Amino acid sequence: MEGSGLRITLVNHSTVLLQQRGSNILTDPIWSERVSPLSWIGPRRRRKPGVRIEDLPHIDAVLISHNHYDHLDLATLRQLAARGGSTFIVPTGVSRLLRSENIGPAHELDWGQSLSLPGFTIHCVPALHFSSRGIYDRNMTLWCGYVIEYPERLVYFAGDTAFGQHFAQIREKFGSPRLALLPIGACEPHWFMSPVHMTPEDAVRAHEILGAKTSIAIHHGTFQLADDGLDTPREQLIACRQDDSFLVLKNGQFANIP
């Protein structure tokens, strides 16, 4: 996208395309039909991606928040790597998996670390979640969110996270983001999911604590991952948000952020 404006397109789930000044960033990309280690079992896609992977522009940076199958999809990452020219940014311990699949270059970041690329800087920030891709590897790699620092604005991509004090800490360290991407789905039953996922009400509180001028809901409406219905998080967010500063986009919809 030309000029100093920011365009954000919700592709699906937590996959978001951020475009500004000719630079393009993609978060947690997934175009596969299932979020599973096996192609014939596991949660199946309920809605198509809003953008075909073949129609993507050149991607400068791919941000991976953690190694769960609905956020780190190897089939998609292989396609992106084959296009060339993308830098893959992952939390500590995840680059080994990417290297084993010839996906790269991959840069690992720990909480508090940063990587500068032409036009923006990526800061790795805390999240309340967990990691695993199998039975015996729980929490052996890190999970995170990212603050994207453009010359004109800050964008916060929360990845997967529960509600917690890290939102206030991020605002204190970086200032209020112009845009926050906050997860709202896979939150029921609350007694079980609350340590790792936010409810729509939690996301509204996070939006307010961050002081974000605009927030956009992610992690909903594509895969059935918990007991909440496919559209329940969207409906709950619309009901509990205070105003239109917290947007709920459909797959393929975009918003221009001045």
Image: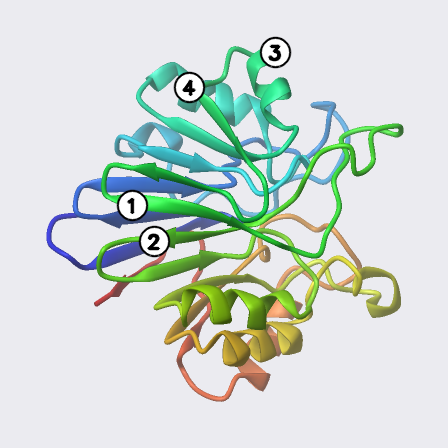
Residue 143's image quarter?
top right
Please identify the quarter of the rendering in which residue 202 is found.
Answer: bottom right
Whether the residues at callouts 1 and 2 have beta carbons within 8 Å, the answer is: yes
Q: Which mark is residue 256?
A: none
Q: Nearer the viewer, mark 3 or mark 2?
A: 2
For marks 3 and 4, give the CA distance.
Answer: 13 Å
Q: Nearer the viewer, residue 185 or 105?
A: 105
Q: What's the residue type where badge 4 is placed? A: Ala
Identified by mark 3, the residue type is Ser
Q: Earlier in the sequence, mark 1 or mark 2?
A: 1
Q: CA distance from mark 3 to mark 2?
A: 30 Å
* Residue drawn at x 48%, y 70% as measured from the top left: 171
Q: Is residue 64 left or right of residue 51?
A: right
Label annotation for residue 81: 4
Judge depth for marks 3 and 4 and give the one in front: 3
Q: Identify the residue at image location x=50%, y=25%.
A: 77
**Label number found at residue 120:** 1
**SS at mark 1 in the image:** strand
Task: Give the image location of residue 31, x and y in percent.
Answer: 51, 34
> Which badge, 3 or 2, comes first in the chain's sequence?
3
Q: CA distance from mark 4 to mark 1?
A: 20 Å
Instruction: Say which of 130 and 238 sits in front.
Output: 130
The CA span between labels 1 and 3 is: 28 Å
The x and y percentages for residue 162 are 70, 62
**Is 56 placed above or below 113 here?**
above
| Residue that carries the numbered disc 3 in the rendered image | 100
- Rate crowding at label 3 as few (under 14), some (14 to 19) or many (20 or more) other CA atoms within 10 Å: few
Sequence order check: which comes first, mark 3 or mark 4? 4
Relative to 44, 76 lies left or right: left
- Circle 2 sits on which residue? 149
